């Protein structure tokens, strides 16, 4: 029998060695302890002043390493997000990952955006239905950053539309802590109470740090609310090379980790135990823009390195992927989405979000989402790896067939051929066959599949009384804002 046999079934890669991760970790501790960070929230500063941290120069905060390390140990190593159907659960834990769609708004004008006289609620509901059907997406994301200027176009009623259209868990942002409070109220109503929501929240909340090392009052208030209510929180950095962070990947890793340390300490001081997921865009800026370039190979590399660090610390990681800088679905979009999704998968990030986003992530395109679903199918097939047990080595079969034999009629072939990947969108016919079938492009086939899904798919039934209560809660929250 085999002993001490090392079996690697799932392909993976690790960017950083443990020594490199330790170096980055200790340098980040040095940054937050010596240089510190700006904290704009009076409430957050009061918490820090009451601890071992040093608050000077109005809002500059320096945090000792002992407090950082104590806080980092206080986050759970497992996070569960539950959709409105019990079977739709995302488990964020060691060696498990989830693919997500979105953010699903704003919609691309020629691909689902409401025309004059059409209802935005219905369009969001239909987009959620598409995500609900596509099997390779485990969660759905709404807008992660909502500014006061566009609050009229996105309110909590649209979260009700997402809930009506999809049973899958969600990643959501909010305009301010009052809107976050409304989201939490919807969550407790959906889950059956505050305690049930804490056990199985239906959403994780997104909070963004203003790199370099500034926590705005709005972000701090939302973070403290998440800590108090135990809402899973994605702490996102926007460390753009040479703009909001050093121009080297290693420097960006140090800075973004120091920003995570600040968030960890604040949540710990408010109430230990907040589920924390790291995230953000540590990458290169676009040409003639201070926005992140989603197709840059440095983004995939730096996020994979951040994933190494997050797993080393026992924290979750949110990775952007399936996003393209291209303005339309063509070769550029295919390259961006395929490379991003593949490397995010190999890195082992817990949540991989962004499929369907195009044009530098400024729009959501349903047809791109359908194509990304196919790409993820291929990636998952690669991710199955190669099994080398007796059944799969097939030594008895090779011996029985012998030289010059055939495998087509063998029982072993019948039992295993269905395990191979079969595309739904990708054309595998020869040129003449492709012409005879209409010479369609990948984009055209995606459009056809998207229309078919929306014509036929009905999400799991939602209790009309619950939906009415959710809409009423959203409406009352909207009135309070005005």
Image: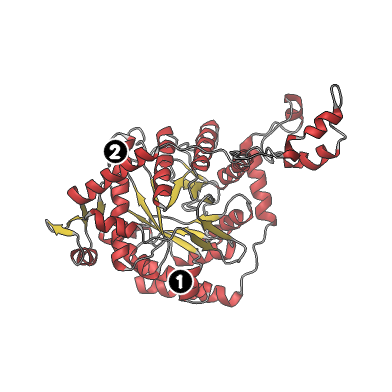
The outermost residue toward the top is 404
- Location of the C terminus by quadrant is bottom left
Residue at the (47%, 36%) spot, across then down: 326
Disc 2 + disc 1, Cβ < 8 Å: no
Image location of residue 168, percent across then percent down: 57, 60
Residue at the (49%, 48%) spot, across then down: 352
Tell me if 85 is positioned left or right of 54 in this view. right
Label 2 crowd bin: few (<14), some (14–19), many (20+), radius 10 Å: some
Image location of residue 66, percent across then percent down: 25, 56
Tell which circle, 2 or 1, labels the residue nearer the N-terminal end: 2
Which one is nearer the viewer's eye here, 225 or 199? Answer: 199
- Assign a secondary structure to mark 2: helix
| Pointer 2 residue | 251
On the question of residue 308 being in view, the answer is yes
What colour scheme does the image use? secondary structure
| Pointer 1 residue | 474
Tell me if 97 is positioned left or right of 479 in this view. right
User: CA separation, marks 2 and 1?
Assistant: 42 Å
Q: Quadrant of residue 413?
A: top right
Which one is nearer the viewer's eye here, 335 or 431? Answer: 335
On the question of residue 482 being in view, the answer is no
Q: Is residue 94 above or below residue 76?
A: above
- Assign a secondary structure to mark 1: helix
Residue at the (36%, 41%) spot, across then down: 21
Image location of residue 231, percent across then percent down: 42, 65
Q: Is residue 159 above or below residue 15?
A: below
**Marks 2 and 1: which is nearer the front?**
2
């Amino acid at each position: 029998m085999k002993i001490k046999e090392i079996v690697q079934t799932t392909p993976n890669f690790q960017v950083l060695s443990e020594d490199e991760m330790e170096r980055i970790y200790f340098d980040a501790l040095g940054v937050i302890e010596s240089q510190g960070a700006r904290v704009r929230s009076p409430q957050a500063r009061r918490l820090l002043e009451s601890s071992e941290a040093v608050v000077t120069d109005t809002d500059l905060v320096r945090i000792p390493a002992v407090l950082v390390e104590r806080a980092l140990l206080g986050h759970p190593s497992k996070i569960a997000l539950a959709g409105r159907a019990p079977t739709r659960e995302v488990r964020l834990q060691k060696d498990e990952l989830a693919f997500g769609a979105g953010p699903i708004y704003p919609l691309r004008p020629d691909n689902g955006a409401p025309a004059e006289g059409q209802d935005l609620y219905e369009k969001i509901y239909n987009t959620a239905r598409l995500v609900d059907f596509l099997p390779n997406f485990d969660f759905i994301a709404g807008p992660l950053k909502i500014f006061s200027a566009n609050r009229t176009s996105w309110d909590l009623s649209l979260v009700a539309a997402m809930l009506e259209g999809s049973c899958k868990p969600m990643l959501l942002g909010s305009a301010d802590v009052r809107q976050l409070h409304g989201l939490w109220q919807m969550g407790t109503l959906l889950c059956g109470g505050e305690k049930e929501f804490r056990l199985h929240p239906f959403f994780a909340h997104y909070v963004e740090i203003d790199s370099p090392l500034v926590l705005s009052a709005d972000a701090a208030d939302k973070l403290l609310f998440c800590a108090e209510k135990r809402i899973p929180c994605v702490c996102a950095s926007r460390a753009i090379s040479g703009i909001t962070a050093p121009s080297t990947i290693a420097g960006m890793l140090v800075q973004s980790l120091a920003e995570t340390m600040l968030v960890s300490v604040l949540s710990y001081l408010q109430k230990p135990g907040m589920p924390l997921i790291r995230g953000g865009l540590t990458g290169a800026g676009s040409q003639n823009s201070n926005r992140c370039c989603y197709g840059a190979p440095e983004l995939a590399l730096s996020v994979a390195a951040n994933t190494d660090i997050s797993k080393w610390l026992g924290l979750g990681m949110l990775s952007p992927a399936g996003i393209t800088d291209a303005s339309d679905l063509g070769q550029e979009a295919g390259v961006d989405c395929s490379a991003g999704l593949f490397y995010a998968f190999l890195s082992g990030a817990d949540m991989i979000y962004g499929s369907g986003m195009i044009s530098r992530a400024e729009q959501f395109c349903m047809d791109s989402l359908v194509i990304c679903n196919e790409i993820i199918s291929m990636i998952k097939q690669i991710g199955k790896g190669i099994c080398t047990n007796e059944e799969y080595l097939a030594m008895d079969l090779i011996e029985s067939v012998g030289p010059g034999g055939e495998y087509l009629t063998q029982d072993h072939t019948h039992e295993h051929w269905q395990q191979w990947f079969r595309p739904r969108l990708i054309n595998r016919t020869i040129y003449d066959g492709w012409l005879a079938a209409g010479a369609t492009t990948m984009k055209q086939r995606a459009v056809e599949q998207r229309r078919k899904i929306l014509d036929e798919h009905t999400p799991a039934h939602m209790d009309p009384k619950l939906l009415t209560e959710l809409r009423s809660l959203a409406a009352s929250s909207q009135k309070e804002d005005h």
